[in-house]
Image: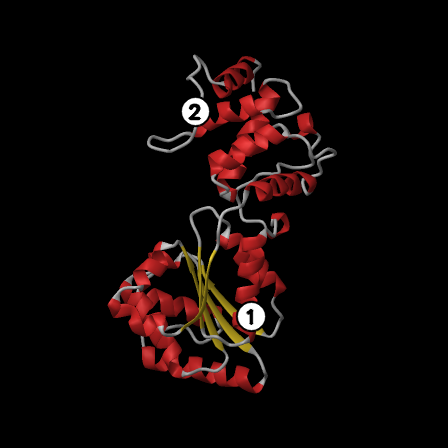
Amino acid sequence: MYTKHFGLAKKPFELNPDPTMVYMGESYKEAMAVLRYGLLDKKGFLLLTGPVGTGKTTLLKLLLKTLSKNIRICLVANPLLSISEFYYFLSAQYGLDEWDGNKAKFLLKFGRMVEECLRKDERVLLIIDEAHLLSEELLEEVRLLSNQEYQVLSIVLVGQPELADHLEQDRFLPFRQRIGLRFNLKPFLDKETGYYIKLRLLRSGAQRLDLFNEDAIKVIHHASKGIPRTINVLCDLALLSGLAEKKHIVNEEMVRECVKEMQLAGEDIPLLPKSKSSFLCKFMGRRERQGF
């Protein structure tokens, strides 16, 4: 909608995880190093946590692109599965016979696959995204899966910080003892927010990288608290504001207006006095009058 106005080849702030748009801030670099070291050093269980919107899934996709081809990978993106569905999914992803409800048979087939990988110098990787949603029963199944003492199996749990808090309970002591490495992904620092915005503009074909002035970037960082997903939403809305106001540089006032558009009840976001009519309402009203 606004790409032509700003001279962009595509929208720079889409919400879908895109490894080509990753800005490797300090926390990202550390997280990637921890994960790669954990896999190379066969640490068994790895734990990656981070607040909502910090880019954990994007980091996972980038990690998978960098891994060698001698790794058999199963990525569980939705952990809201029953135990039977979990084993059915693992069987399908690892190319085993279809799950028939017999766990003993599954473990025998899984064990043979792992032994084959050991002979071929291959690795087996199980990644569970959104792992904070795992039921206690399924979490126990994941732990028991690692009980087989497979030398080539690594399990990565990725989730929100409450996952680590959840595992601190006494009943999960056997699970915690198996975690070889853990890392908590942090939001961007103030300078990193600016670098992130400019990188996404550059990779979207921008001819100039000052589409957001420095004051606008400061407000974006403060309002988003350095969370990449929130930065994306706010920047996308700000570029739409620029189109509505026929401006080619996003300034602080425009961003503050967008912050008001985004605010949900109870959010701690700095606001300007409420205007009579938002830019978005004005813009959409004009588009409707023009027949769009």
- The amino acid on which the numbered mark 1 sits, given as a three-letter code, is Tyr
Residue 236: x and y in percent read: 56, 32
- Residue 130 sits above or below residue 204 on the image: below
Q: Quadrant of the N terminus?
A: top right
Residue 228: x and y in percent read: 52, 43
Q: Residue at x 70, y 35 (%)?
A: 209
Whether residue 51 sits left or right of residue 39 in the image: it is left
Q: Residue at x 69, y 40 (%)?
A: 202
Q: Which of the 4 image quarters holds residue 157?
A: bottom left
Whether residue 165 sits left or right of residue 121 in the image: it is left
Q: Residues within 10 Å of mark 2 (few under 14, many from 20)?
A: some
Q: Which of the 4 image quarters holds residue 238?
A: top right
Which of the pair 255/149 is nearer the observer? 255
Residue 122: x and y in percent read: 57, 79
- Residue that label 1 marks: 37
- Residue that label 2 marks: 271
Marks 2 and 1, how far apart at CA: 44 Å
Q: Secondary structure at mark 1?
A: helix
Q: Secondary structure at mark 2?
A: loop
User: Outermost residue toward the left?
Assistant: 171
Residue 283: x and y in percent read: 53, 18
Q: Residue at x 47, y 73 (%)?
A: 154
Whether residue 265 sits left or right of residue 157 in the image: it is left
Q: Residues within 10 Å of mark 1 (few under 14, many from 20)?
A: few
- Residue 225 sits above or below residue 94 on the image: above
